[in-house]
Image: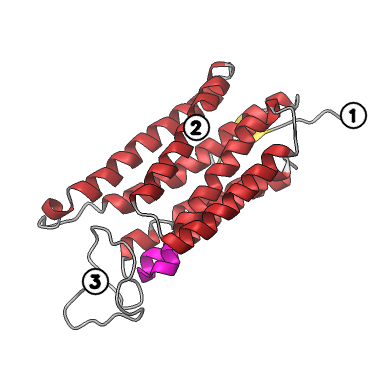
Amino acid sequence: MADGMSSFWGPVTSAEWCEKNYVYSNYIAEFFNTVSNVPGILLALIGLINALRQRFEKRFSVLHLSNMTLAIGSMLYHATLQRVQQQGDETPMVWEMLLYLYILYSPDWHYRSTMPTFLFLYGAAFAITHALFRFGIGFKIHYVILCLLCIPRMYKYYIHTTDVHAKRLAKLYLATIILGSMCWLFDRMLCEKISGWYINPEGHALWHIFMGFNSYFANTFLMFCRAQQRGWNPKVAHLLGCFPYVKIEKPKVQ
């Protein structure tokens, strides 16, 4: 904590990261880890507007809202460093991955009602259990397993996609998750060393930024693949010549 600066939120009750606490404000514990979630919120908002404007299936609107919820939960967690807010960050992480699993695997699932029912009950059970027992390393292992379950299906979508721009989205998704993970590990494992540097590279804040873009690229790629499945003639366009999004042409008669 900075000299002479008190904490508005009280003693820290959650896991801490390498950023020094309350350096810029007594209302924000980890300033960079908090504000670095803003790009993720804005990107999710862009995706949500596109999904609603072009009338994609509701699952994608929920997915973008899930990204926004996760980023807001992360902001509250890093701003306060309280246990309850940490739960509000970690639980949506699992819910989001369950939603990705549904979007990835549901097109080939023969019993349509069983998958969403199971995933909903699983998510509810996890939320209650995690709140009661506060998993540590178990939460991280569980989250990584959920991420790994998505990879085979993402790879299948990638190899069955011929559009060059869509493939680029998948490559950007892979690049951002690798870079983000390296920043996360760097911040977590080398904190004692980098704390002595004149400038802290804020690896966890970079993780937030990379993962905000990672979610956006993943969502856009999945929207393209789903539009192909539905025969909507998808194309990857660019907002302001920069941000990719999916543009579709639905048949007049469904």
Image quadrant where one finds the C terminus: top right
Observer able to see residue 45? no
Q: Given this view, does label 2 or label 1 mark the residue nearer the observer?
A: 2
Q: Given this view, does label 2 or label 3 mark the residue nearer the observer?
A: 2
Q: Is residue 129 above or below residue 147?
A: below
Residue positioned 50% across, 57% down in the render? 129
Neighbourhood count class around disc 1 (C-alpha, 10 Å): few under 14, some 14–19, many 20 upward:
few
Neighbourhood count class around disc 3 (C-alpha, 10 Å): few under 14, some 14–19, many 20 upward:
some
Q: Is residue 91 magenta?
A: no
Q: Is residue 1 above or below residue 59?
A: below
Number of labelled discs?
Answer: 3
Badge 2 amino acid:
Leu
Neighbourhood count class around disc 2 (C-alpha, 10 Å): few under 14, some 14–19, many 20 upward:
some
Q: CA distance from mark 2 to mark 3?
A: 39 Å
Q: Residue 76's mark?
A: none
Residue positioned 19% across, 55% down in the render? 200
Return the x and y of residue 183 as percentages of the image width and height. Answer: 28, 44
Return the x and y of residue 5 as percentages of the image width and height. Answer: 23, 81
Q: Are marks 2 and 1 in contact (CB under 8 Å)?
A: no
Return the x and y of residue 150 as percentages of the image width and height. Answer: 51, 32
Q: Helix, strand, or loop for circle 2?
A: helix
Observer able to see residue 250? yes
Q: CA distance from mark 1 to mark 3?
A: 59 Å
Q: Which segment did they paint magenta?
A: 75-87
Badge 1 amino acid:
Val
Q: Main secondary structure of the magenta part?
A: helix
The residue tagged 2 is: 149
Q: CA distance from mark 2 to mark 1?
A: 36 Å
The residue tagged 3 is: 23
Q: Is residue 232 above or below residue 238?
A: above
Residue positioned 52% across, 36% down in the render? 218
The residue tagged 1 is: 253
